[in-house]
Amino acid sequence: MTATDTRPVDAARALFADRFGAAPAGTWSAPGRVNLIGEHTDYNDGFVLPFAIQHRTHVALAPRNDGRVRVASTFDDGVVEVGLAELGALFPARRDEIPEWARYPLGVAWALLESAGTDPHTPTGVDLAFASDVPVGAGLSSSAAIEGATAVALAEIWGIDLDRVALAKVGRRAENEAVGAPTGIMDQMASLLGRADAAIFLDCRSLEAQVVDLGLAGAGLELVVIDTGVKHSHATGGYGERRAACERGAAALGVPALRDVAPRDLPRLAELVDDVTLRRVRHVVTENQRVLDTVRTLRDHGPTAIGDLLVASHASMRDDFEISVPELDTAVDAALSAGAVGARMTGGGFGGAAIALVAREKVQEVTDAATAAFDAAGFAAPTIFTVTPSAGAARD
Ligand code: GLA
């Protein structure tokens, strides 16, 4: 961000003028997301229940007539420039030649042209300038916000008629192959399909999405994000190891994905794999059930009734999947002790943010309790704010 008091859409326009010396043809934007429940289930063909948040990444764009693409971001001083026809040689093999931040938009340009079957020599070139207020490294999908904004902007400018699910797949491919993070499709789907006041119940096998009303305001609830400030990256280490353990578990049971495993299969699995793999699988299998239970509970009893499911989800990630960190556990425990209805870490884990579902009148108490607990544990102060379920990617 150039300045915290500048709206990101204005910052994107100003950056465009500054780096490219002209006015953009338009701006597009896409949101970050909070996952309410359903963690590490997406790449197991399972269920997730995320919602888009009010924090967005904006891209200011103008076409060029020379087949080149230039990208700029408020997070970096440079401009990265490549020819559209060169993208196919860069991704994935030579992605290290591109600065990491630029792999997201350039990866989307590459994957979009490929999935539309467009000859990279034909579309017009583009200049793109990005600005965002989605916290980075907080587990709120700042990367999916860049991908979503780029995908809708380029699809419109290039006249590529792909639906939102296809655009989400483009974003996932950019993330997997251009960035090198072996993530699933939840974040891109949430960013592209988000709706005000609602979560998206997604079947990650069929990619069928249902809008589920959250009714937070009517129930007097707020969704509080406690950003621990512990940065994580899914391109390295733990995320990929967890994914590999899930694949081992599915292979041991002879099924395509853990989506096909039920709790009653776990005793049989215990005879086939080591204890760590068993616990990784148990998390995914029970988490899928918790998503289904959460959707049903929301519909039948409203959001106040889902607290125990959030708490059980966190315990499963802490104890079975082992992707929590002390800061996340401290945030969850403090929120619950201060009267939150439920709380859990959200996103891929190893850092990032926890969420707490909190009665409006208790938000200050929860905020103070989390801040005090971090201080007592010797952790740097967390950043705490509320989020609102918001609309997905669109032209501004
Ligand atoms: C990250 C990934 C998602 C998903 C979550 C964990 O956010 O990008 O695809 O796997 O972690 O639920």
Image (tube, grey):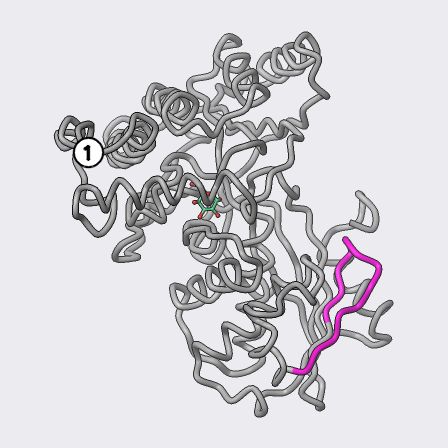
Residue 294 visible, this orientation: no
Position in image of residue 380 (x %, y %): 72, 21
Position in image of residue 121 (x %, y %): 59, 91
In the picture, measured across the screen, residue 215 lies left or right of residue 18, that is left
Q: Residue at x 19, y 33 (%)?
A: 272
Q: Nearer the viewer, residue 369 or 396?
A: 369
Position in image of residue 102 (x %, y %): 68, 63
Residue located beneath label 1 in the image: 272
Q: Nearer the viewer, residue 110 or 278?
A: 278
Q: Secondary structure at mark 1?
A: loop
Q: Residue at x 14, y 33 (%)?
A: 265
Rendering quarter of residue 376 = top right
In the picture, measured across the screen, residue 64 lies left or right of residue 273, that is right
Quadrant in which ligand 1 is drawn: top left
Q: Residue at x 75, y 60 (%)?
A: 73
Quadrant of the image containing the C terminus: bottom right
Position in image of residue 287 (x %, y %): 30, 32
Rendering quarter of residue 213 = top left
In the picture, measured across the screen, residue 290 lies left or right of residue 9, that is left
In the picture, measured across the screen, residue 272 lies left or right of residue 200, that is left
Principal secondary structure, stretch drawn in magenta: strand
Q: Residues within 10 Å of mark 1 (few under 14, many from 20)?
A: some
Label 1 C-beta lies within 8 Å of the nearest ligand 1 atom: no
How many numbered markers are drawn? 1
What are the residue bounds of the magenta stretch?
71-83
Residue 218 visible, this orientation: yes
Q: Is residue 291 magenta?
A: no
| Relative height, residue 216 to residue 51 (above, below) | above
Q: Nearer the viewer, residue 93 or 210?
A: 93
Which three-letter amino acid code belongs to the residue tagged 1?
A: Leu
Rendering quarter of residue 309 = top left
Q: Nearer the viewer, residue 95 or 347?
A: 95
